[in-house]
Image (tube, coloured by chain):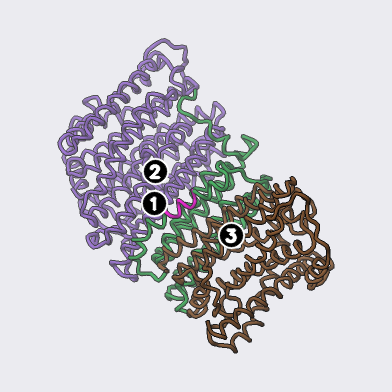
Chain colours: A brown, B green, C purple
């Protein structure tokens, strides 16, 4: 618990909070550009958050305490997730709080609360969204776990900081299982972050919504927190992906100068990742909802094959 | 470069396995053919790399043969065939895709466990890929069984040959040249014959659905 | 050696020649001529090998020893007699409109090419080339099976191609594994798939690899032999093609596959030292005999019934070779010979019968003996022969196999007896009405060629009664080659 550690943790938190909406805006910007539309600008999410915080919150008459609590819970979970993923530095005092498995559990916790809140009011679309969210989550969670296990098997630890440190410090090694895990992870993150081909974030048709349907009833600061939490989730997933598959540039413990370097490196990596995501969204068409289990099943099985390849090739 | 060769070969092996899975879960025939061509390309790359690392010109020849046959000629022929047969619609499968995937996983586990003791004995630098090659063969076999149209069955057959050639390349640095030529000739003639057949099946049954080809039974009069 | 060049070159040349001229009326005679030439060359080759002993030829790529040379001669002989049978048969088919000139060209040239691939498979020393030859034989016969272009024959040919293609791919994997085992022992520069080289070092081949290799090879080549449960292509393919094709498929191609399995078994036994290979073969063989015998009773199509009989007999042969003792090997070789002769003879008579009746359904063929006594008697005698009645050769070999089984593998004997008994009853029950009984069939326009039938049956009879000493020595030598 050194001062450097605390500093790096705080820096990681603040970076996550500030950069997440920028990442969302960047991805949206590129989506629009690739579709030959004019974009609202990368700072649009900030403007939206600013607008929402100033408004008056309207809550349904028979909403319970759960409904009011859920945005805070989700925001808290996402923030904690971002805090323990090594983005800038592997010296994170909060990291013992949760390893890879608990990370998945954090996401699950957030998902449960938001689904319950959606069903709380009793509207049809809320229940629809909640059920779909649980379907996607039920299949995506094992896949994500398997992906994380792939990396854990190679590095012999489930703690994210140890994974990043080990993978970054090894001499250049191409792990075939990470290829399979990478494909699986891309599929899972597309599903979890409500991107095409699983869910269209731009949609205004309630019957095609998954994520949007959950937050239909919210307004003002609750909505702002939920939108911010969604951006943080995207940020967290991107950082997990970078940590597992492109871990270079993250500062080690006790190297303050490296942390200064880590920030532009993170920027760069996230920018590329965002563009790639926008590209994938452009070339895919949204799947019908009954195809989603196939999609996620494929991701799960690819991750399991990655694990098996690890065993076969004698790694870990 | 030479130090990384085993990793690259393993990478190609995994890519080939990935493509086998992609082919199983693929619904559209045009994408199937393209995936098959990419699988052939990965195989060619592995052959060339292995040939470069082990200084065996035979592998270059083998790779060139695969390139001409499996990456260029056969996919071109298949594309032409499906254009003329007009079979570009979606492929139905006998099992639904998640079940197919689960069975595929079982086959992969089976193949890996079978090959593990043998691959440990291999002298080649890429010996670990034997299990992956066997898994590809079994997955292609499954693709042949679970598809109900003629073209995917043919592609499954060709993909199985890909897996076998890959096994030969990685485990024993290729087979004797004459054998490789013989195999290539067989595959080529086989595909040509299958192409002719598909036309005739189409003529007789007005469709390439394999269910039409299941009428011969024991107690049929 | 020159004889080998002729043995391989004549069918190849014939195939090329008939590809252009196969539709002419004299093409059928040319076909017979080429087959005759091949047979003569095979006889020369046999005489040479008996005199000189086993030898490798042409940079060690070809290997002739007593085991394969007698199979070569058998193949050439049956090809010749089938070609003779095919002369009038195909003429009738052409008259009935089932064969057009392009298809006749295809038929004749593929017939010769098929002969070439079989002979190549027997004489090559390279295990990889055996595979190539087997696959090529499959391809040529696929074209032959589908030559009528009916929906049933297309289905049979498609199934044949796909199932055999899959099976044979397993055999390729086994071959690759064998090559890997050779690689370890002989080193990368001298690693080879030549059987003679592998035979010399078979004791040093790694048992793990060879075990796995043999399993794949047995499954792969076993598919082509028709072992249950990999047999589902066989009844369709043998039943749907023209009858000469059924005859060579049942009589000859199954032998080539069996030969490939045997060569691999010799290597495996040397490498493992345990009887695993033999036990596997016995298991598959027994399964095939039993299952085929029971399926026999359900058949309504005469050619399908006899193709199940082929599965049964190949199962018996596999069982015999699986037992592995010298006597069992001898019995297996004898059975291979007489089975080829008798089964093709049966298919000849059945072919004529079905041509007369216009149908392959057994309940619609009646009273052959009244219409054409020679066909009727031919069928009756052929069936008696294949069912193992003395004094035909099948009785001798089955007797040997059964007694060896009772002595060495007593648990298997009841199954064998049961299966053979069931087959006996089923076939006889169906053939008797076909031969005797009332009929309204008319004679055919062209007299059938029944000489081949009776030549085969006489040979089978002779082999049952008395095996000439040089033939006996041949078999014994061959049996000892198999490690007995």
Based on the picture, tell me whether residue B107 belongs to the magenta stretch: yes
Q: Are marks 1 and 2 in contact (CB under 8 Å)?
A: yes
Q: Is residue B64 visible?
A: no
Looking at the picture, tell me which residue is in the foreground, C263 or A237: A237
Q: Under tag 3, what secondary structure?
A: helix
In the picture, measured across the screen, residue B26 lies left or right of residue A21, that is left
Same chain under badges 3 and 2? The reply is no
Look at the picture and state if A263 lies above or below C280: below
Q: In this picture, which residue range is highlighted in magenta?
A: B103-109
Residue A254 picture location, percent across and down: 53, 87
Q: Give the CA distance from mark 1 to mark 2.
A: 9 Å
Chain to which mark 3 belongs = B
Chain to which mark 2 belongs = C
- Which residue is tagged 3? B37
Residue C227 picture location, percent across and down: 36, 39
Which quadrant of the figure has residue C172? Answer: bottom left
In the picture, measured across the screen, residue C345 lies left or right of residue B140, that is left
Q: Tell me how many marks there are.
A: 3
Look at the picture and state if C265 lies above or below B199: below
Residue C410 picture location, percent across and down: 18, 35
- Which residue is tagged 2? C223
In the picture, measured across the screen, residue B138 lies left or right of residue B85, that is left
Q: Give the CA distance from mark 3 to mark 1.
A: 25 Å
Q: Is residue B212 visible?
A: yes
- Which residue is tagged 1? C171
Residue A174 picture location, percent across and down: 50, 73
Report crowding for label 1: few under 14, some 14 to 19, many 20 or more residues within 10 A (C-alpha).
many
């Amino acid at each position: 618990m050194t001062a450097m550690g605390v500093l790096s943790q705080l820096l990681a938190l603040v970076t996550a909070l500030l950069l997440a909406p920028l990442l969302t805006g960047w991805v949206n910007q590129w989506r629009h550009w690739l579709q030959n539309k004019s974009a609202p600008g990368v700072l649009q999410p900030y403007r939206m958050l600013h607008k929402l915080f100033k408004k008056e919150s309207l809550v349904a008459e028979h909403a319970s305490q759960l409904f009011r609590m859920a945005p805070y819970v989700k925001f808290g979970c996402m923030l904690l997730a971002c805090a323990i993923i090594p983005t800038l530095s592997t010296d994170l005092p909060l990291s013992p709080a949760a390893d890879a498995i608990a990370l998945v559990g954090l996401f699950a916790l957030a998902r449960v609360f938001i689904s319950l809140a959606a069903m709380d009011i009793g509207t049809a679309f809320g229940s629809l969204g909640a059920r779909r969210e649980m379907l996607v989550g039920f299949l995506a969670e094992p896949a994500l776990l398997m992906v994380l296990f792939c990396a854990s098997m190679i590095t012999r630890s489930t703690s994210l900081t140890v994974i990043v440190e080990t993978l970054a410090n090894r001499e250049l090694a191409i792990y075939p299982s990470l290829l399979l895990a990478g494909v699986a992870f891309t599929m899972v993150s597309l599903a979890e972050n409500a991107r095409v081909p699983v869910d269209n974030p731009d949609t205004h048709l309630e019957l095609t919504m998954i994520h949007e349907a959950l937050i239909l009833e919210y307004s003002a600061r609750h909505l702002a927190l939920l939108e911010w939490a969604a951006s943080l989730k995207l940020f967290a997933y991107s950082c997990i992906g970078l940590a597992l598959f492109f871990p270079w540039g993250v500062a080690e413990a006790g190297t303050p100068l490296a942390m200064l370097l880590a920030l532009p490196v993170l920027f760069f990596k996230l920018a590329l990742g965002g563009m790639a995501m926008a590209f994938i969204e452009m070339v895919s068409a949204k799947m019908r909802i009954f195809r989603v289990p196939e999609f996620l099943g494929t991701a799960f099985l690819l991750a399991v094959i990655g694990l098996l390849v690890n065993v076969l090739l004698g790694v870990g | 470069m030479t130090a990384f060769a085993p990793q690259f070969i393993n990478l190609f092996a995994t890519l080939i396995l990935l493509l086998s899975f992609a082919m199983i879960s693929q619904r559209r025939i045009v994408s199937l053919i393209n995936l098959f061509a990419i699988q052939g390309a990965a195989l060619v790359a592995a052959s060339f790399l292995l040939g470069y690392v082990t200084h065996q010109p035979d592998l270059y020849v083998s790779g060139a043969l695969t390139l001409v046959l499996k990456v260029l000629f056969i996919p071109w022929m298949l594309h032409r065939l499906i254009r003329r047969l007009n079979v570009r619609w979606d492929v139905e499968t006998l099992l639904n895709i998640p079940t197919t995937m689960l069975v595929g996983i079982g086959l992969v586990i089976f193949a890996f466990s079978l090959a593990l003791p043998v691959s440990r004995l291999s002298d080649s630098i890429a010996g670990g890929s034997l299990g992956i090659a066997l898994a590809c063969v079994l997955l292609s076999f499954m693709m042949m069984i679970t598809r109900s149209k003629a073209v995917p069955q043919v592609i499954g057959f060709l993909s199985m040959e890909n897996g076998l050639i890959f096994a030969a390349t990685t485990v024993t640095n290729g087979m004797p040249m004459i054998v490789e030529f013989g195999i290539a000739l067989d595959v080529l003639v086989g595909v040509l014959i299958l192409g002719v057949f598909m036309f005739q099946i189409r003529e007789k049954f007005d469709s390439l659905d394999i269910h039409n080809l299941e009428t011969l039974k024991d107690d049929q009069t | 050696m020159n004889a080998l060049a002729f043995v391989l070159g004549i069918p190849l040349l014939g195939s090329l020649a008939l590809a252009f001229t196969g539709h002419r009326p004299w093409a059928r005679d040319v076909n017979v001529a080429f087959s005759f030439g091949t047979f003569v060359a095979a006889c020369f080759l046999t005489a040479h090998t008996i005199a000189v002993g086993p030898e490798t030829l042409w940079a060690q790529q070809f290997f002739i020893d007593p085991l394969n040379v007698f199979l070569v001669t058998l193949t050439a002989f049956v090809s010749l007699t089938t070609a003779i049978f095919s002369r009038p048969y195909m003429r009738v088919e052409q008259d009935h409109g089932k064969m057009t000139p392009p298809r006749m060209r295809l038929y004749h040239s593929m017939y010769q090419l098929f002969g070439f691939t079989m002979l190549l498979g027997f004489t090559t020393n390279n295990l990889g080339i055996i595979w190539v030859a087997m696959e090529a034989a499959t391809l040529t016969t696929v074209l032959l099976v589908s030559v009528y272009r009916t929906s049933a024959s297309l289905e049979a040919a498609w199934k044949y191609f796909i199932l055999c293609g899959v099976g044979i791919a397993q055999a390729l994997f086994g071959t690759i594994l064998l090559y890997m085992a050779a690689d370890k022992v002989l080193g990368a520069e001298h690693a080879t798939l030549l059987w003679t080289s592998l035979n010399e070092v078979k004791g040093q081949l790694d048992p793990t690899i060879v075990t796995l290799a043999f399993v794949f090879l047995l499954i792969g080549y076993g598919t082509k032999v028709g072992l249950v449960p990999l047999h589902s292509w066989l009844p369709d393919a043998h039943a749907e093609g023209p009858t000469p094709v059924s005859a060579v498929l049942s009589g000859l191609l199954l032998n080539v596959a069996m030969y490939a399995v045997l060569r691999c078994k010799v290597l495996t036994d040397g490498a493992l030292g345990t009887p695993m290979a033999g036990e596997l073969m016995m298991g598959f063989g027994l399964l095939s005999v039993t299952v085929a015998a029971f399926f026999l009773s359900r058949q309504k199509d005469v050619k399908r019934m006899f193709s199940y009989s082929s599965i049964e007999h190949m199962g018996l042969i596999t069982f015999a070779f699986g037992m592995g003792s010298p006597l069992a090997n001898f019995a297996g070789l004898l059975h291979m010979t007489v089975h080829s002769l008798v089964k093709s003879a049966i298919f000849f008579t059945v072919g004529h019968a079905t041509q007369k009746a216009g149908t392959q359904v057994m309940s619609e063929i009646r009273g052959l003996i009244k219409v054409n006594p020679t066909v009727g008697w031919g069928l009756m005698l052929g069936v008696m022969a294949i069912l193992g009645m003395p004094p035909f050769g099948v009785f001798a070999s089955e007797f040997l196999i059964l007694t060896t089984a009772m002595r060495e593998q007593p648990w298997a004997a009841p199954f064998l007896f049961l299966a053979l008994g069931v087959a006996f009853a089923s076939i006889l029950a169906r053939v008797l009405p076909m031969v005797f009984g009332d009929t309204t069939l008319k004679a055919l326009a062209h007299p059938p060629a029944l000489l081949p039938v009776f030549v085969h049956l006489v040979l089978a009879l002779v082999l049952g009664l008395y095996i000439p000493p040089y033939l006996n020595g041949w078999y014994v030598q061959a049996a000892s080659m198999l490690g007995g």
